[in-house]
Image (cartoon, rainbow, N blue to C red):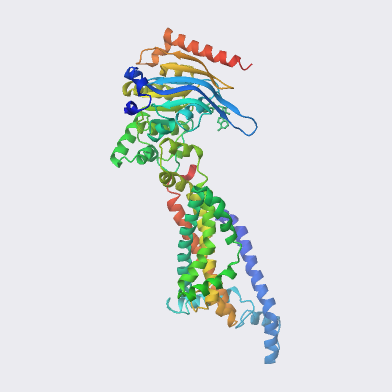
């Protein structure tokens, strides 16, 4: 038990420091507003009154961790999961766009990678565009995509997924190109001696070799995909989704709501990356990888 | 491969007894690697004819081009000049017809596949059904003494065992021509003796043609019908020694005078090649 504590000590120490800083920050940032409140009410106040007040504001500049936690609990457990007051509902809406965008991104990114690895002309003609595409800020692209898709009659899920895909195909392409090229030359020679076809070499050798690279990319991609979906929810002006929740929170000065939506996004991100890691262990870790 | 009668060299074959049909025919072949600093002449004026049923060993110091020569036969390297046919075809055409099985110096197993699925890899590629694949895998793994290791992964095996898996993989392919690059180099002597006996028996009973690279004089004499002694820089053939021991070999034969004489000649040839260097 002591060894366990010793190993966890640094993490715990940092965690506690962050909490202390957070509460300190809440006092500091909320104090002017609290003092103004006291003045308006004509109340005399001491140091303890001030601390109490800064921890219990209705619309604090910086809410305390316990305020965020109780808002989360309230939202998650006091409303049915289908209610727009339940954050699970919003997380579900965002997760849907995230996953669809992610799947489209994996398909598109993998297609590009396979083309780039197998066709020399694609390598020189396509790769620069793939890289340039990522230099355009997503905040500039997102409203455009929403407008264009809206004109074509698509609203809601599809434009969000497309924006997600735009962000997340890139790590897939880069990782998979690297993975598909990391094949052991001797293993390729072996395939040659069997006069294996290009597709046999791909499925039996190149793809299995690239799986560890692909899964590293997938874990990055799925997190980016979530960011894409949240960003996409801002200009759509929708009422559902974590992005919409962030937007309306800032619109109405509901800082606690913003923070709970943030925490919910982080939890969703952790869940998605965790699931990707689990898939990796099931598929790549299947018995034999240790020596590889 | 019985297909050679349809080939351009059919006339030449017609004059040769069937059992002496050339499987590999190399004439004044050279190969120069264009390395970054200066070109390396890996093979220089190689002339070699390997007949059906031959067991030919290539022996020589490191860097004399043994691997390169084997890779040229397998169409893994392209000669700079000279001619070569395999089964009367260009090496590429022969490779596309799956004329040979190749055992590399390193095991080259796929780490994500079990031992059995490594052995059945080439059989999947040529499209055999699962029962036949498993039958051949079991048979060849038993031959190399690895029965019971089917479900293990390569990293769970020693280096020598991995190399034996790679030999089983090549044998399961059932090629008529077997190209082997120091397959037993990493094995201990007892395993090596055992596999040498197995290989010799396999060769004798199946009539396969073998090209075998080795560093070991006694291994070369024990296995071969002919021994090709090579020298480095540039890679040349110094001597081709007929090894006319009875086709049925036994490990005791290594004590015989005939065996010792041939070994002495190989050793002499190698020493001569070495003196070029000093
Ligand atoms: N791909 C290559 N590029 C350049 N030089 C090479 C290459 N492969 C082999 N060589 C050189 O060719 C010579 C013969 O090599 P190799 O056939 O591997 O010798 P051996 O198998 O007899 O030890 C060596 O000098 C080696 O450095
Ligand atoms: Mg070699």
Residue A245: x %, y % from top left = 53, 77
Total count of labels:
0
Regarding residue A69, the answer to whether it shows in the image is: no
- Given residues B222 and B195, the one toward you in this image is B222
Q: Residue A148, percent across and down?
A: 51, 73
Tell me, yes or no, if residue B36 can be seen here: yes
Q: Residue at 44% of width from left, 27% of height from top?
A: B180
Q: Position of residue A223 (x, y in %)?
A: 53, 63
Residue at the location (49% across, 70% down)? Answer: A160
The residue nearer to you, when weighing A227 against B25, is B25
Q: Nearer the viewer, residue A119 or B163?
A: A119
Q: Quadrant of the N terminus of chain A?
A: bottom right
Q: In front here: B4 or A174? A: B4
Vertical relation: B39 (above or below) A114: above
Residue at x 55% of width, y 80% of height: A248
Left or right, A105 with reference to B200: right
Q: Could you say which quadrant of the image residue B248 lies in?
A: top left
Outermost top residue: B257
* Quarter where residue A9 is shown: bottom right
- Write down which quadrant ligand 1 falls in: top right
As displayed, is residue A4 above or below residue A260?
A: above
């Amino acid at each position: 038990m002591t060894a366990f504590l010793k190993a966890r000590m640094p993490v715990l120490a940092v965690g506690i420091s962050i909490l202390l800083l957070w509460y300190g920050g809440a006092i500091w940032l909320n104090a002017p507003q609290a003092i103004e409140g006291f003045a308006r009410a004509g109340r005399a106040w001491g140091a303890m009154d001030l601390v109490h007040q800064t921890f219990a504001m209705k619309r604090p500049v910086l809410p305390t961790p316990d305020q965020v936690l109780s808002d989360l609990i309230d939202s998650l457990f006091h409303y049915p999961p289908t209610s727009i007051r339940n954050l699970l509902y919003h997380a579900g809406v965002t997760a849907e766009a995230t996953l669809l965008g992610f799947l489209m991104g994996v398909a598109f990114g993998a297609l590009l990678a396979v083309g780039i690895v197998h066709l020399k002309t694609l390598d020189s003609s396509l790769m620069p565009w793939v890289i340039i595409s990522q230099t355009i800020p997503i905040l500039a692209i997102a409203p455009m995509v929403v407008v264009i898709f809206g004109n074509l009659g698509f609203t809601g899920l599809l434009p969000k997924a497309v924006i997600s895909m735009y962000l997340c195909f890139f790590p897939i392409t880069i990782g998979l190109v690297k993975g598909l090229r990391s094949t052991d030359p001797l293993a390729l020679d072996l395939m040659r001696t069997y006069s294996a076809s290009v597709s046999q070499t791909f499925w039996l050798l190149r793809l299995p070799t690239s799986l560890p690279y692909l899964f590293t990319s997938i874990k990055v991609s799925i997190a980016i995909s979530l960011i894409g979906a949240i960003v996409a929810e801002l200009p759509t002006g929708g009422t559902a989704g974590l992005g919409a929740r962030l937007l309306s929170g800032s619109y109405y000065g509901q800082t606690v709501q913003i923070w709970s939506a943030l925490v919910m996004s982080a939890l969703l991100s952790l869940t998605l990356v965790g699931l990707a890691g689990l898939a990796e262990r099931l598929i790549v870790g299947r018995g034999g990888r240790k020596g590889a | 491969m019985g297909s050679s009668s349809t080939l351009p060299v059919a006339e030449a074959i017609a004059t040769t007894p069937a059992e002496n049909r050339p499987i590999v025919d190399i004439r004044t072949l050279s190969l120069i690697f264009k390395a970054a600093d200066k070109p390396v002449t890996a093979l220089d004026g190689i002339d070699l004819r390997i007949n059906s049923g031959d067991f030919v060993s290539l022996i020589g110091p490191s860097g004399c081009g043994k691997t390169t020569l084997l890779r040229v036969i397998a169409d893994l390297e392209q000669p700079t000049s000279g001619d070569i046919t395999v089964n009367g075809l260009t090496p590429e055409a022969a490779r596309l017809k799956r004329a040979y099985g190749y055992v590399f110096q390193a095991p080259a197993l796929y780490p994500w596949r079990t031992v059995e699925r490594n052995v059945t890899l080439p059989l999947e590629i040529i499209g055999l059904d699962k029962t036949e694949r498993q039958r051949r895998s079991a048979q060849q793994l038993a031959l190399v003494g690895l029965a019971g290791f089917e479900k293990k992964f390569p990293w769970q095996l020693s280096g020598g065992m991995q190399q034996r898996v790679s030999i089983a993989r090549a044998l399961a392919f059932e090629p008529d021509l077997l190209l082997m690059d120091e397959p037993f180099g990493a094995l201990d002597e007892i395993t090596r003796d055992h596999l040498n006996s197995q290989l010799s028996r396999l060769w004798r009973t199946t009539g396969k043609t073998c090209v075998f690279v080795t560093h070991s004089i006694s291994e070369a004499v024990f296995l071969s019908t002919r021994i090709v002694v090579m020298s480095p820089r540039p890679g040349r053939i110094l001597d081709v020694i007929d090894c006319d021991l009875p086709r049925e070999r036994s490990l005791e034969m290594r004590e015989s005078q005939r065996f010792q004489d041939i070994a002495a000649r190989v050793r002499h040839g190698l020493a001569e090649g070495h003196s070029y260097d000093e």
